[in-house]
Amino acid sequence: MAYAVYHMEKGNSSSGGIGNHIDRTEGKEHSYLQADPARKHLNIHFDVHEKRNEIPLHEAIEKRIAEGYKGEKAIRKDAVKYCTHVLTGSHEKMKEIFADKEKSKEWIKDNYKFLAKEFGKENIVRFTLHLDEKTPHLHAVTIPLTSDGRLSAKEIIGNKQSMKNFQTRYAAEMEKYGLQRGIENTGITHENAQDYYSRITEAEKEAVSSQMTAQKNLLGVYTAESVQKLESSLKSANLALKMKDYELKKNEERLRFSSQGKSRAEKNEQTALIQKRELISKSLNEKENFKKIILDPERTERVRYNLLEEKKQNEEKREQNKGRGFSR
């Protein structure tokens, strides 16, 4: 399954960092280290209202506020002045979309329409396509001005539930591209949003891995590095299991409301999801049991004692051999 990814953040401080990242500012390469310099020319900085994309982001923000703000009170220093948006999807599906020139144009156009409808085209001060990173994605910056000229992110964006509603509406617009509503409460951030779902595949591969080896130190105690690797594997398994549960739930809902009965292909898809979920669950249980074993304090102490006893016995044998006139 492929997922629509929409992430938004509020900004009330200097926009220099995000501006440098979006605009790929010369001399500020530290703000876009993941970008491939050889592909920088592929990026597209689209024209926005009053061509504010042609001036530095902080100036574009201040100009739009000066033009649109109708409030009588001075704007607070800690007021939210802008919102940043990342719009993309699962890596493989985005690659597929951008392999088709016409489809990619339509995808970009529909993303712009979505933002214009939600925030007003006059409030969009950046709309940029990045093709120099791993997954094609759009960056946008909007100003939270209300229709009556108030600067109010609270009213425009709302609470967490409102943000979820934004994501749901965005996914609905992206369905025609084979992108659906992603899993909720993932904790993804601005930096990793566009790569999140591509990592799901890697998490699944690691989750079902049967290799559960761990290195010991000289005293027979499992090393911290081995424990960390196991913890990482457990995290991947939990993530993959959460995703499979979500996919099964969405698939069941889709089939329940289907006007036709389940087709053979749909039944096979559901069966495959169930089998994959069971495999991941089994692997997760095995890894959790393995963790209990290697972190068992009594076992650790027992192994340590046995090794020390063995070492003591070997030393006694060497001393006895020396007394007999030969050594090893």
Image (cartoon, rainbow, N blue to C red):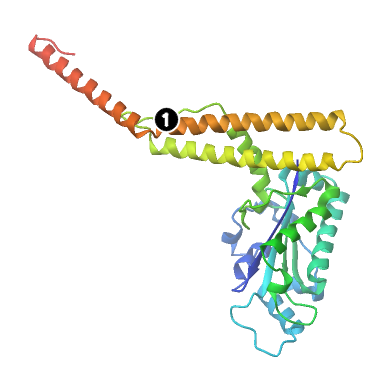
Residue 147, compared with residue 167, is above or below; it is below
Q: Quadrant of the N terminus?
A: top right
Judge left or right: residue 25 versus residue 125: left
- Where residue 273 sits in the image (x, y, percent)? 72, 33
Badge 1: how crowded within 10 Å, few (<14), some, or many (20+)? few
Q: Is 46 left, or right, of 15 in this rendering? A: right
Residue that numbered label 1 is attached to: 293
Q: Where is residue 153 in the image (x, y as percent from the top left)?
A: 69, 73
Per the image, label 1 sits on a secondary structure element best described as helix
Q: In the picture, residue 298 is in which quadrant?
A: top left
Residue closer to the observer: 30 or 267: 267
Q: What residue type is labelled 1?
A: Ile
Image vertical order of residue 169 relative to residue 262, above or below: below
Q: Position of residue 253 (x, y in %)?
A: 79, 43
The residue lying at 74 percent from left, 62 percent from top is: 128
The quarter in which the C terminus is drawn is top left
Query: Given the current orientation, which residue lies at the most extreme front position?
Result: 256
